[in-house]
Amino acid sequence: MSRIEEKLKILADAAKYDVSCSSSGSKRKNKGGIGDASASGICHTYTEDGRCVSLLKILLTNHCIYDCAFCVSRKSNDVKRAAFTVEEVVDLTMNFYRRNYIEGLFLSSGIFKNADFTMERLLRIVKKLRTEERYNGYIHLKTIPGASEELIREAGLYADRMSINLELPTEAGLKMVAPEKDHESVRKPLAFVNEQMQSYKKESKLIRHVPSFVPAGQSTQMVIGATPESDFEIMNVADEYYKNYKLKRVYYSGYIPINNEHQALPQIGSAPPLIRENRLYQTDWLLRFYDFKLDEILHPGHKNLELDIDPKLDWALRNPHFFPVDINKADYKMIIRIPGIGRQSAMKIVNARKFGKLREYQIRKMGIAFNRARYFMVCADTPFTLGNMAMDHVKKRILENGNSTYKRKLPTGQLTLF
Amino acid sequence: MYYLFDGSYAGFLTCVFESFEHREFSVTPITSDRFTGDFFRDNREVITDAAKAKRVQRGLRKKLDSNRAMDFFRVYLSEDPEAWQAAFRMILRIFDTGPEIMLDFGDNDVIFFAQTLKKVGRERHRMKAFIRFQKSSDGMYFAIVEPDFNVLPLISGFFKRRYADQPWLIYDARRKYGLWYDGNTVAEVQLTPAEKDALSPHHIAITLDERDEHFQQLWQQYFKSTNIESRRNMKLHLRHVPRRYWKYLTEKNGM
């Protein structure tokens, strides 16, 4: 194995727990060089864990002065260390990009020496890509907490997206596993970049050629299941960050145990909470695209999401008085609340019903999950029934007839004999 | 009535024109090579006529915005006679009653058209993602693909804009033609038998750039290292990267 291959192995391995891989949201054009950003983003391949590979996701180095218990690159961990040179990262990025392997670069780093020193190195790489290589592809750059505002501002002129991870959802959780860190050092730079973004946007309305500043916005990530926060606490934090910092995305990353040194963390061998992670993403989507309010899904009396059913179905089962919905009359806003009907199918329904009352066989062709939706909607030919079916019965029927991905992975509630 | 055309989009549009000309509205457009004969229905040979096709295209553009009018071209690229039939009947309906019928998703033709459009769009997107260039010793970046639908015309502009400063060739091995960009314009090319042999996937006879294998190997290494073993989910992996695409994916070969 060549030295560069070994470095790539180490520094890709160390970067992969950062789950953000989106390459969407930027409209950077190719101005006489190479590359552009595709507004919808492109996943160029998928690893065997089913995750999308869009960007070359690497650390500049996994040397780090911090000792955060949840992090594979923490100072006290006995792993191989490596560092790329600026030229190596540029060469890899350009050659992968020119072969259409990737949509762009995701560059993060362990903190070596201090924040400014690290940020300055990252900046040198993105600057070289943009100015010397005339590269207009996507760049996702980590903001290093504690770096000076001048460095962050300059980096923002070259990057498409910037992000800083909250890591643990609550300050208390963070203090448990990373006593040297706090949420304030994440809030401050998120706020700074957001202010810059807004002021560049305002300026571009007045003046024509204002350079773009972090055009694809900011994101953050929370580790799920390392510390004992409830789903309610997690989604509250997400909701607040979406609102206060206008984040494009909050990522939820199921904790994968990497050592047994810290007693409070899940130990090696315990499975990452993949179903819970999925349910959190579904909730995130309901909040951002389905016009749900957080307290409809989670509240102090209902702190955790169900694992066996999705949060929209769970909401519907707890709110039978809204159902069944007449798809020939109801508003779009109510139709997207029917379990098993998404935004695209709802649009089709609203358009199609102008041509005549819709019957069940027509709705079924529009790409809905009929097994779930059937109990919550009325079509033109739905037989009239007296009274409503009890919701616990509905849930049972759905679970029996469905082929949920998680069917076999969930505990059945029945004890085994041995 | 069957209308036999040459398989080109202009030919398809000519069929629409002739349908109005002959006042024949129960028409199934089909290519001559796929037509197996039908004892009960007549057929008519339609000769592709650029002027007639243009008039139909212009008519569509008057009724629909350019992107919606383009949808008919996209669906035509599915190479599916059933989708052609649906598209054909929809065009007649649009000229008859107006463009709103595009949203009549309760109608069999409209929903099938929408589903086909989605499939073609997905394949187009996959080609943007799955094309893997290899660099030859003379600096040409070339790739071979076998898309489910004839989507090369739909990705030409994307690759031209993105890879503006490098010459490239994308060859559709199933349909036996390619797109070639010389640094200025994209042209459609047919290859000679010798050139086709040189591009044979398991025995590429083109001399590669001296660093190409090095980067292929690094990419394979990256693909392995960025995977999280404890999250392994091959079902999901296969849903996103179906086996039929593996042949030309650098990361799924070698090592």
Image: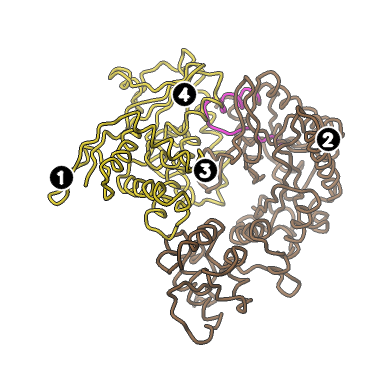
| Sooner in the amino-acid sequence: mark 1 or mark 4 | 1
Residue at the spot of label 2: A115
Amino acid at the residue labelled 2: Ala
Find the distance from the CA under tag 3 to the CA under tag 1: 45 Å
Q: Is residue A13 above or below residue A132?
A: below
Residue at image position (60%, 72%) is A316
Q: Is residue B179 above or below residue B238?
A: above
Amino acid at the residue labelled 4: Gln
Image quadrant for the N terminus of chain A? top right
Residue at the spot of label 1: B37
Find the distance from the CA under tag 3 to the CA under tag 2: 33 Å
Q: Which label is found at residue A46?
A: 3
Q: Are marks 1 and 4 on the same chain?
A: yes
Nearest the eye: B251 or A309? A309
Regarding mark 1 in the picture, which secondary structure is present there? loop
User: Is residue A331 left or right of A241 when viewed as pictured?
Assistant: left
Q: Quadrant of residue A107?
A: top right
Find the distance from the CA under tag 1 to the CA under tag 2: 76 Å
Q: Colour of chain B?
A: yellow
Mark 2, mark 4: which one is toward the viewer?
4
From the top left corner, tell me how far across and down residue B53 is, in percent: 35, 33
Amino acid at the residue labelled 1: Gly
Amino acid at the residue labelled 3: Tyr
User: Which chain is rendered brown in the image?
Assistant: A
Q: Are marks 3 and 2 on the same chain?
A: yes
Graded by Cα atoms within 10 Å as few (under 14), some (14 to 19) or many (20 or more), the crowding at tag 2 reads some
Graded by Cα atoms within 10 Å as few (under 14), some (14 to 19) or many (20 or more), the crowding at tag 1 reads few
From the top left corner, tell me how far across and down residue A279 is, in percent: 62, 61
| Sooner in the amino-acid sequence: mark 3 or mark 2 | 3
User: Is residue B158 left or right of A277 when viewed as pictured?
Assistant: left
